[in-house]
Amino acid sequence: MISKILFVEPPKDYWFLMGEYLPPPAGLLILAAYIEEQLPDVEIEILDCQAEKKDFKDIEKYIEYFSPSIVAASGFTCNAYLCARVAEIAKKVSNDIFTVVGGQHFSAAAEESLNDFPEIDYIIRGEGEVTFVDLIRALEAGKNIGEIKGISFKHNKEIIHNPPRPLIQNLDTLPYPAYHLVEKNIEKYHFTMMAGKNTRYMILEGSRGCSHKCSFCTQWKHWNGAWRTKSARRIADEMEYFNERFDGEFLWLTDDNFKYDNKAKELWQELRHRQFTDDISWFFQARTDEITQNPDMVAKLRDVGNNWILMGVENNSPAVLKDLKKNLQVNDAYKAVKILKDNDIFSHTMFIMGSRGDTAISIEQLRQFSFDLGSDLALYTILTPFPGTEIYESAQRFGWIEDTNYAHYDMAHAVMPTETLTRRQIQEELFHCYKDFYGSIPRNIAGIFSKNKIKRRVNRHMAGKGVLKSLKGLI
Ligand code: B12
Ligand code: SF4
């Protein structure tokens, strides 16, 4: 009898580059909402260890107390071991508990994970909602798991990967994320650097997937190379609901590729109609080419609260961009930063170093490019071979990976060398990027005295001693 499901958000490390934050466990809330809708008799709880400051001992006690039929967890590559540990604890409490994991890492590394972690019963690959509900129904009815699309599992020591599940056609049919399940924690969710310590931070989905195919990115493969969006009205409805029902004031859209063409105008109309202004700020990620092609819409969305945009600029070298299959012009980066600045939108750029051909000279050129670009926040990262990416396949084939500890797959640790730089040298280069950018006296003075409170806050964090100390610790 499947009567209770416990979702566990394990205790994780902070991504120190973005300062202090506590995110709601968005993926789990989205899944939980669908299960609640389809299987109203199943009792669901979410144990958010980050919000509730619980450790693995507490997880064990909670599983004993709640006595669930299924324990489920989700994690990125750098959190994979934590999810496996949750499954291990569940099995320790009772071997009858079914353990289920999903998400981008486990989908891509299903075979390896089932081999390495015998405590995991089922891996749900790709889109989770329908597959998880089918699994629960099959377990309840004692039906053959082999018929459920999208699942990987072990049967008599053999690993079985059922065929993939087709994607949900219309994302508007999904229920709203089940924030009511974490209501007791809701006032704790915040993102200090982005919105301040006391501003309530909530995550919602505008779209899933991406139509580009960058060689370092897990996102497009996870969603079968398709980009699907909710309608503008539905996104606005969710934003309004989060604000009115839960006082959400800083809303993070999970979109990795916000496409202006498809919905920006309608979204602006919807939000304007609902009198969205600056009181509710919201964020997404967009490509520089999308921004340069849609300056008018960028300006309009600013008027209804979109005050921070993250852009994957990645690199200054057209050859590296080609290698990364990013399909962007370097010049778009300059134009996009200018468009954001002209509209008082906080411009956040991301850079990738550590490509195979990178040298000390090419990284110095990348640094120089990032200074010239002059975005408000520059985050430098190290090329990381996440399972499921093309880079991972090449790295495996050619034996580039020197560090196989997934806990280090956070884009701040160098896990493979380049042709000319050791991992230690890459780590030192990363340190220098931050030291040179955030140690600049004119930039710091401009940050401290900026009229824009976001810029003052970001400057305080990035120019503080904490970031450089953490980066030095990685060398
Ligand atoms: C919001 C976000 C964050 C937030 C926090 C999110 C959180 N709650 O912890 C912040 C800013 C803190 C963050 C940090 C990082 N992030 Co981040 N983040 C995201 C983002 C934009 C949205 C996540 C989300 O909620 N998606 C919506 C849900 C519905 O999708 P989903 O989780 O994939 O879940 C679906 C399925 O995968 C499946 N599923 C997932 N889990 C499970 C579990 C079960 C049991 C089942 C049945 C199904 C299932 O069902 C769900 C519904 O279909 C994603 C990109 C994206 N668009 O997904 C990146 C992403 C997850 N982040 C990524 C990375 C690399 C990081 C960082 C390491 C560094 C960085 N550059 O930001 C840090 C790590 C921090 C840490 N130590 O945990 C990568 C992960 C790649 C990988 N394989 O590891 C992603 C995919 C971005 C990318 N394009 O590469 N992130
Ligand atoms: S990096 Fe961005 S543009 Fe490239 S595939 Fe991933 S989400 Fe799409």
Image: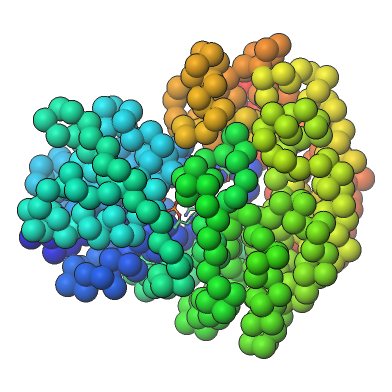
Above or below, 325 against 295 in this view is above
Task: Please report the residue visible at 41 percent of the width from the left and 56 percent of the height from the top.
Answer: 167
Task: Please report the residue visible at 69 percent of the width from the left and 70 percent of the height from the top.
Answer: 264
Above or below, 392 against 188 in this view is above
Question: How far across and down, in percent of the image, does residue 202 sit?
Answer: 52, 66
Q: Quadrant of the C terminus?
A: top right
Q: Which of 242/295 is in front?
A: 295
Question: How far across and down, in percent of the image, does residue 313 sit?
Answer: 75, 43
Above or below, 218 against 252 in this view is above
Q: Examine the image and state in which quarter residue 57 appears.
A: top left
Task: Please report the residue visible at 70 percent of the width from the left and 45 percent of the height from the top.
Answer: 312
Q: Quadrant of the N terminus?
A: bottom left
Task: Please report the residue visible at 27 percent of the width from the left and 32 percent of the height from the top.
Answer: 114
Q: Residue furthest right?
A: 442
Left or right for 168, reference 328? left
Left or right for 267, reference 86? right
Q: Examine the image and state in which quarter residue 261 appears.
A: bottom right
Q: Is residue 51 visible?
A: no
Question: How far across and down, in percent of the image, does residue 215 sit?
Answer: 60, 34
Question: How far across and down, in percent of the image, does residue 263 sit?
Answer: 65, 70
Above or below, 142 against 151 in this view is below
Left or right for 422, reference 69? right
